[in-house]
Image: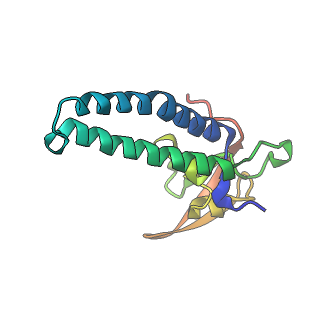
């Protein structure tokens, strides 16, 4: 059994693979070249370009190691027609609060959580409250400000079309 922490959407996995490829083939190569050129300028102890390049190279290598290890354990969760009508991993959910404010979220793995894209982690209180629910269900979510009520207006397994 895979833990929720190791789940990812197909799009999320592709994005991590692209990041890894870009870091390895482009960023690391360019940074290594810059460090080599900076080292040729002489005294490395006083060379800010050299020090910054080495620091950036360590960051890149650390991220590459992390991504390689992470990609080994991540399990892609594919859409299944049996999910229709209920909220599960990968779903886009349109919610309405008691004030009539409408929000749309996608339930994704921790590695692809992104508030700017309305992608919330499957481990978040909101996502945990939504799992298994259907359209017109009421969802209660504990927040720092207290309990909040939400109503499920719509569930989709492809992105909502922006009107």
Residue shown at 52%/35% (left/top)?
19
Of residues 35 and 27, the one nearer the viewer is: 35
Q: Residue 108, how many percent across, how many down?
A: 62, 49
Q: Is residue 144 above or below residue 67?
A: below
**159 vs 74: above or below:** above
The x, y position of residue 125, in whole percent, is: 57, 64
Residues 16 and 68: in front is: 68
Residue positioned most to the right = 82
Could you say which is closer to the camera, residue 4 or residue 163?
A: 4
Q: Residue furthest left?
A: 46
| Residue 110 seen in this snapshot | yes
What residue do we see at 13% from left, 42% from top?
46
| Colouring used for the render | rainbow
- Which of these two is toward me, 65 or 132? 65
Residue 104 seen in the current view: no
Look at the image and tell me in which quarter the N terminus lies. Answer: bottom right
Quadrant for the C terminus, please.
Answer: top right
Percent of width and height locating residue 74: 67, 50
Q: Look at the picture and state if 52 lies above or below 134.
A: above
Residue 65 lies left or right of residue 7; in this view the side is: left
Q: Residue at x 82, y 43 (%)?
A: 80
Locate residue 35: give its quadrant.
Answer: top left
Q: How many marks?
A: 0
Where is residue 162 shown, x and y percent of the image?
56, 30
């Amino acid at each position: 059994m895979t833990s929720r922490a190791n789940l990812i959407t197909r799009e999320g996995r592709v994005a991590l693979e692209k990041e890894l490829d870009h870091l390895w083939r482009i960023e690391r190569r360019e940074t290594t070249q810059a460090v080599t050129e900076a080292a040729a300028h002489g005294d490395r102890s006083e060379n800010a370009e050299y020090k910054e390049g080495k620091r950036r190279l360590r960051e890149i290598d650390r991220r590459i190691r992390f991504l390689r290890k992470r990609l080994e354990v991540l399990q892609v969760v594919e859409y299944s027609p049996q999910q229709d009508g209920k909220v599960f991993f990968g779903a886009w959910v349109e919610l309405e609060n008691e004030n009539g404010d409408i929000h749309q979220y996608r339930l994704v793995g921790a590695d692809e959580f992104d508030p700017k894209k309305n992608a919330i982690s499957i481990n978040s209180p909101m996502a945990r409250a939504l799992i298994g629910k259907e359209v017109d269900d009421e969802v209660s979510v504990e927040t720092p400000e207290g309990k909040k009520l939400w109503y499920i207006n719509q569930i989709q397994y492809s992105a909502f079309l922006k009107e």
